[in-house]
Amino acid sequence: MTEVWGLAAHHLLLSAAALGLALVIALPLGLVAARRPRLAAASLGVAGVIQTIPGLALLALFYPLLLAIGHGLPALGFLPAWLALALYALLPILRNVVAGLRGLDPAVIQAADGLGMTAWQRLRLVEAPLAAPVVMAGIRTATVWTIGAATLATTVGASSLGNLIFSGLQSEDWTQVLTGCLASALLALAADGLLALLERGLARRERWSLILGGTGVAIGLALACAPLLGGTGQRSIVVGAKNFSEQFILARLIGDRLERAGYTVSYRQGLGSQVALHALQQGDIDVYVEYSGTIWADAMHRSAVAPRGATLAGIADYLRPSGAALVGPLGFENAYALAMKRPVAAAHRVADLQGLAAAAPTLNLGADLEYLSRPEWRAVRDGYDIRFGSTRNYAPTFMYRALESGQVDVISAFSSDGRIAADDLVVLGDPKHVQPGYDALLLASAAHAHDRRFLAALTPLVGAIPVAAMRQANYMVDRDADKATPDVAAQWLAARIGRK
Amino acid sequence: MKQQGPEVRFEHVTKRFGDAAAVAGVDIAIAPGSFVALVGGSGAGKSTLLRMVNRLETPSEGRVLVDGRDVAEGPAPSLRRRIGYVFQSIGLMPHMSVAENIALVPRIAGDPAPDVAALLEMVDLPAALGRRAPDALSGGQRQRVGVARAIATGARLMLLDEPLGALDPVTRDGIGQRYRDLHERLGLTSIMVTHDMAEALLLADRVIVMAKGRVVGDATPAEMLAGKAGPEADALVAVPARQAQAIAALRG
């Protein structure tokens, strides 16, 4: 539960910073635009278009954008989330500034000019106080949106209450999902309530409303800043994780060992597959587990499958220019594989991919969100000439549900997934060897590639995790009943492989 | 206290909006301490002419002089603070009390606060009204506050743009007379725009009739009534004169 407080503070800090930036842009822009109809139409149009971009996509777009800008700007974490959320908050503020100023009684403006106010006096004494309630209503809308959308910041590696939602969704820990949702909703309601008090104070010129609302907002911001004050000191090690249970477990396993070696550790979880490797090369994260085939096919764009040794050597060479390093393989593979329920496979006489090709037109494929756009799928599809009756995308958890209920007949599974053994699924073999290997590899960023203490803490994991142990640990987190948290599973795994 | 308000001169003043001339070559000299009414139908250019005195409009040609100084010199805000401005929609600040409204110009000019109670008394309002919000006042009370706000500046030149236009006849008469008294007592120069000839005749020392941006009649009320101010003025004077006769006839 203490985790919730920390995440809520990060969530609030991120939202407040984004709103602050949005205000810095929207207030002056709105002020100028209120008197220039064409500028108002243009700026409101742009802000409106930004608003139509789904929040998740907007956040994701900032990653390649910041990478392209380069100059050592961190492309992951706070910066992209801050910028994307600020853009998102722009429209309601801008719209209400323009509306608030345009809605002023022309007689009042005529009087302000006729009495001899300077432009600044008119703004300060007349326009600002009279438009304030309308502007405040826009800020309230922006605040509620931003606090809601900040849950998505998790996907670009910024801590927020979304951490609970995304990892809970992954591990089907509904309590965790609900905790994240409720906490962010409560935060939004509290912020909205305080701002409503300020709005009321401005509209009715009630001093106590202003004092109460202002004090509330100040206390909230102070609490949000608390984690900043505590955490100053040496830079902590950032352990990255992609968006599935195995990654969460391994991240904790790695993190626990580093903590015991005396490092301060923080986590960036839920990273997209492409994002994670870039983040390591950029130094945004310091360590994570990647799979050899993913690097080989996605990052190095190799289509030909090479023997294991050559693949690992090639990857080490590929990482060298960025300073990042391959610490070593963990000992198990997590390959993309197609899997079916045993009775269904038997009914269609499917034993391997060769057999699947004949039956595929009458079968439905359920794939995780990225499989169909990945080279592994293209290799399998073209290598065996497989054409499915239909294909659908699912979040991994729901993909297994769809297979169980018969909505789909074949799924894109991972070979280390605990549910393969638990659900008695058949993993279809690859007799033509069209897919590369997927050794789990421990990777370190340039900052720690030659850090002895760091390497001493992590090398005991190299070659130490058999696939059966990993499957069991995964299953502890993924199973429907009696779920373990990734933390608990990581501790279990450490004990199981004798690296406690 | 019997110091007089400034002289105002319009020299060949023209104001064009696009191709249309709202004011076309006006030359007028307004003597210190006089009360001048600018009369005419809508679109005659009288409001535009008035607004060129405090630079709410700038002349396309010619210039406006107050006590011999071109109003275009120096910054507009400091000019406007030296000229009282009262207009039909009043424009009291809704977020300020009546007292704050009256003290507004000294406040923005950085001058000491005026005696609000005395100013309220000058326009026949109780001092207690100062604490109220403008919304709580009647239309007539609001315009009285508008006059008090203009006088609070210490200005000796008053521009009144249809100040009584939105008020009922009884209130108009009361405020009109009251203002005329203040004009005398404070030694102001007053220029009042109105479309009501009767009001002009009753309040002003001099009535200037405008049509299509030009001055078409310029005389004292007595001369106007005697038909010495030209056909446009006669047409405007004819209406209240006939009404007065009709009312007198009704009395028997």
Image (cartoon, coloured by chain):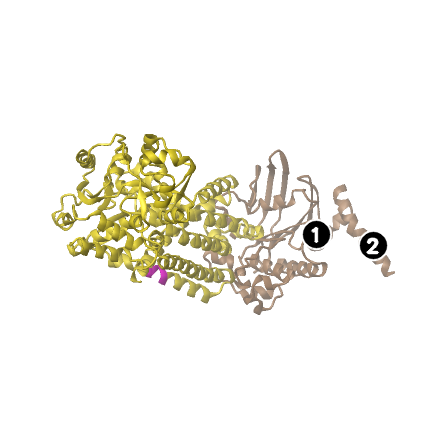
Chain colours: A yellow, B brown
| Residue sitting nearer the eye, A180 or A145 | A180
- Circle 1 is placed at which residue position? B200
**Residue A200 in view:** yes
Q: Is residue A64 magenta?
A: no
Q: Residue at x 39, y 61 (%)?
A: A217
Q: Label 2 marks which chain's residue?
A: B
x and y, in percent, of residue A177 in the image: 37, 56
Disc 2 marks a residue whose amino acid type is Gln
x and y, in percent, of residue B203 in the image: 69, 55
x and y, in percent, of residue A115 in the image: 53, 53
Q: Main secondary structure of the magenta part?
A: helix
In this rendering, is residue A187 above or below A67? below
Q: Give the magenta-colored segment's residue range.
A: A219-223
Mark 2 Cα-neighbour bin, 10 Å: few <14, some 14–19, many ≥20:
few
- Circle 2 is placed at which residue position? B245
In this rendering, is residue B183 above or below A365? below
| Residue sitting nearer the eye, A357 or B150 | A357
Label 1 or label 2, whichever comes before in sequence order: 1
x and y, in percent, of residue B146 in the image: 59, 58
Query: Can you tell which quarter of the image residue A392 is in?
Result: top left
